[in-house]
Image: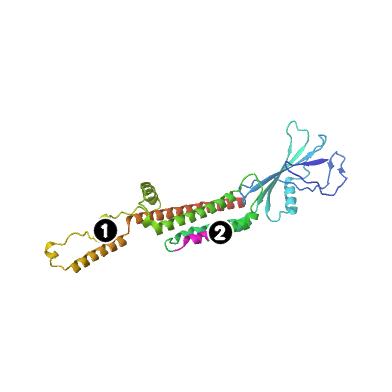
């Protein structure tokens, strides 16, 4: 008589009872009694949906007077298992190995079966990974929208809302058991974190573009870290600054009525209206030059915004590229097994 051992939970045998065995003259006894049980197996879901599971089944005799042996080759067992195995299309049988444990000190004979199963990942790639990568790619290309003329933040908020709804709908496909967090959950969390970070960055850039003229001068550490170092890394080196201090001072003096005196030979011959008109025209010209050249503080803040935008765009591109290459490589390697 044999009984079934497993490190995890095993249900009661539901097969019909057969009280007969086959006894041969050479002492061999064959027990053809069917056994039908439902057992559990501890899963390692870290690489879900590209995971491979290994389950162990142990058959042990009740007493040490009974020797347990395999009655057929393992190749025949695999062939018959493939014919009757039902996995609802999610699992694929990879291999079955069996051996008899003969360690010293054992009181019973043990037959140990190791069953290797590989999850079919196509369903999860199509329903989980491809839509997630599509949404994150759309968010990546949204960096091409000009923040000063398009409400990029509303577009990104719509993408975040759509991605959240997608995760809620696809939550039933994710595994809920296991001792480790699946790598795909970390990938989804990183995607959502990057989308939120891009939204916050868009809000910051839009604020810099619209209100940079009212800001204080760019701090020294921001100029050194962002404009010089980070700007060179992303291909936006600092632009040469223009000195508008003389023009601005002259403009203020003209508006305050402190313009330089006209030549003496023209002071008495020029009517007062013409002198006033000339002073106003010079003030208008200086104001137009100041508007066309742009304020230095505003230009620096706008350049800071452009560098940060370019940097996050490159970070997005790197993350998507590495993630896509890694998933494709894992997918191809899992199919080769």
What colouring does the structure picture have? rainbow
**Residue 221 percent location from the top left of the image:** 37, 46
**Predominant SS of the magenta segment:** helix
Closer to the camera in the image, 93 or 277: 277
The residue that appears at 46% across and 54% down in the rendered structure is 201
Mark 1 Cα shell of 10 Å, populated few (<14), some (14-19), many (≥20): some
In the picture, measured across the screen, residue 223 lies left or right of residue 262, that is right
Q: Is residue 206 magenta?
A: no
Q: Residue at x 43, y 58 (%)?
A: 206
Q: Earlier in the sequence, mark 1 or mark 2?
A: 2
Q: Residues within 10 Å of mark 2 (few under 14, many from 20)?
A: few
- Badge 1 is on which residue? 252
Q: Mark yes or no: residue 116 visible.
A: yes
Where is residue 147 shown, x and y percent of the image? 43, 60
Q: Position of residue 76 (x, y in %)?
A: 74, 48
Helix, strand or loop for disc 1: helix
Q: Is residue 83 left or right of residue 193?
A: right
Marks 2 and 1: in contact by CB < 8 Å?
no
Left or right of residue 323: residue 102:
right
Of residues 134 and 272, the one drawn nearer to the viewer in this rendering: 272
What span is colored magenta in the figure?
Answer: 150-157
Residue furthest left in the image: 265
**Element on which disc 2 rests:** helix
Q: Above or below — where is 315 with respect to 24?
A: below
What residue did someone put label 2 on? 161
Q: CA distance from mark 1 to mark 2?
A: 51 Å
Q: Nearer the viewer, mark 1 or mark 2?
A: 1
Left or right of 102, for residue 314: left
Rendered location of residue 182, percent (x, y): 61, 48
Return the residue nearer the eye: 181 or 4: 181
């Amino acid at each position: 008589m044999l009984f079934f051992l497993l490190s995890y939970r095993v249900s009661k045998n539901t097969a019909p009872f057969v009280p007969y065995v086959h006894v041969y003259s050479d002492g061999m006894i064959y027990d053809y009694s069917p056994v039908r049980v439902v057992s559990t197996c501890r899963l390692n879901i870290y690489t879900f949906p590209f995971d491979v599971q290994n389950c162990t089944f142990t058959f042990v005799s009740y007493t040490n007077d009974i020797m347990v042996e395999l009655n057929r080759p393992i190749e025949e067992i695999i062939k018959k298992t493939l014919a009757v195995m039902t996995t609802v299309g999610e699992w694929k049988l990879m291999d079955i190995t069996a051996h008899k444990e003969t360690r010293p000190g054992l009181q019973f004979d043990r037959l140990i079966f190791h069953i290797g199963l590989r999850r079919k990942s196509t369903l999860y790639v199509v329903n989980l990974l491809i839509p997630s990568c599509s949404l994150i790619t759309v968010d990546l290309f949204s960096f091409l929208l000009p923040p000063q003329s398009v409400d990029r933040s509303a577009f990104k908020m719509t993408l975040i809302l759509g991605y959240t709804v997608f995760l809620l709908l696809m939550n039933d496909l994710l595994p809920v058991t296991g001792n480790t967090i699946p790598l795909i959950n970390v990938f989804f969390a990183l995607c959502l974190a990057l989308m939120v970070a891009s939204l916050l960055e868009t809000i910051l850039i839009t604020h810099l573009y619209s209100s940079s003229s009212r800001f204080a001068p760019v701090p020294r550490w921001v100029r050194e870290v962002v404009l010089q170092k980070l700007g060179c890394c992303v291909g936006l080196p600092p632009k040469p600054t223009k000195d508008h201090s003389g023009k601005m001072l002259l403009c203020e003096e003209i508006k305050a009525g402190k313009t330089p005196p006209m030549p003496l030979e023209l002071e008495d011959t020029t009517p007062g209206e013409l002198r006033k008109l000339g002073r106003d025209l010079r003030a208008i010209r200086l104001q137009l030059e100041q508007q066309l050249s742009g304020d230095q503080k505003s230009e620096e803040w706008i350049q800071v915004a452009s560098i940060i935008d370019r940097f996050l765009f490159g970070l997005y591109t790197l993350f998507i590229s590495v993630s896509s290459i890694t998933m494709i490589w894992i997918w191809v390697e899992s199919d080769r097994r």
